[in-house]
Amino acid sequence: MRRRLDTHEQCLKAFTAELKTEIRSSLSAWDTLDRKEASGRRMAYMQVVTLIKRHAEAHGIPLADLGLVDYEVPASPL
């Protein structure tokens, strides 16, 4: 059973790291989007990050392990 849990945690860690990278790279494109589209994209990212944090905490996965302790989706530069 422990091995399976490790696999799930590793998957969640990898997903979180890739999501944060995607958010960072999207920031560079936000200045080419109109205000409404940039705001919608940021809201979607915020929702995903909130869900990950909530489920990680519910399952006893420390947010520090996922790099999400103080993580917030950066504000749109618009």
Image (cartoon, rainbow, N blue to C red):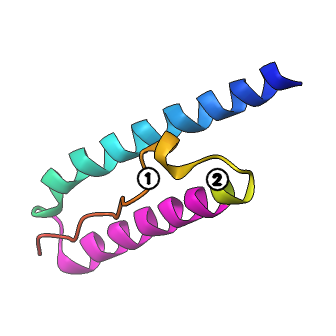
Q: Image point 79% across, 19% down: which residue?
A: 3
Residue 36 falls within the magenta-colored stretch: yes
Mark 2 closeness class: few <14, some 14–19, many ≥20 residues within 10 Å = some
Q: Quadrant of residue 74?
A: bottom left
Q: Is residue 43 above or below residue 25?
A: below
Q: Which mark is residue 68?
A: 1
Q: Is residue 30 above or below residue 67?
A: below
Image position, residue 33 (x, y; %):
17, 66
Image position, residue 60 (x, y; %):
71, 50
Farthest residue toward the bottom? Answer: 36
Q: Which mark is residue 33?
A: none
Q: Amino acid at mark 1?
A: Leu
Farthest residue toward the top? Answer: 3
The quarter of the picture where the N terminus appears is: top right
Tag 2 and tag 1, C-beta contact below 8 Å: yes
Q: Quadrant of residue 10?
A: top right
Q: Image point 19% across, 70% down: which residue?
A: 76
Q: Image point 43% across, 67% down: which residue?
A: 46
> Image check: 48 left or right of 25?
right
> Image check: 40 left or right of 78?
right
Near-viewer residue (57 or 29): 57
Q: CA distance from mark 2 to mark 1?
A: 10 Å
Q: Is residue 7 above or below residue 42?
A: above
Q: Which residues are magenta?
A: 33-54
Q: Quadrant of residue 41?
A: bottom left
> Image check: 21 left or right of 77?
right
Q: Which residue is mark 2?
A: 56
Q: Amino acid at mark 2?
A: Ala
Mark 1 closeness class: few <14, some 14–19, many ≥20 residues within 10 Å = some
Characterize the magenta stretch by its predominant secondary structure: helix
Q: Dot 1: what SS? A: loop
Near-viewer residue (14 or 61): 61
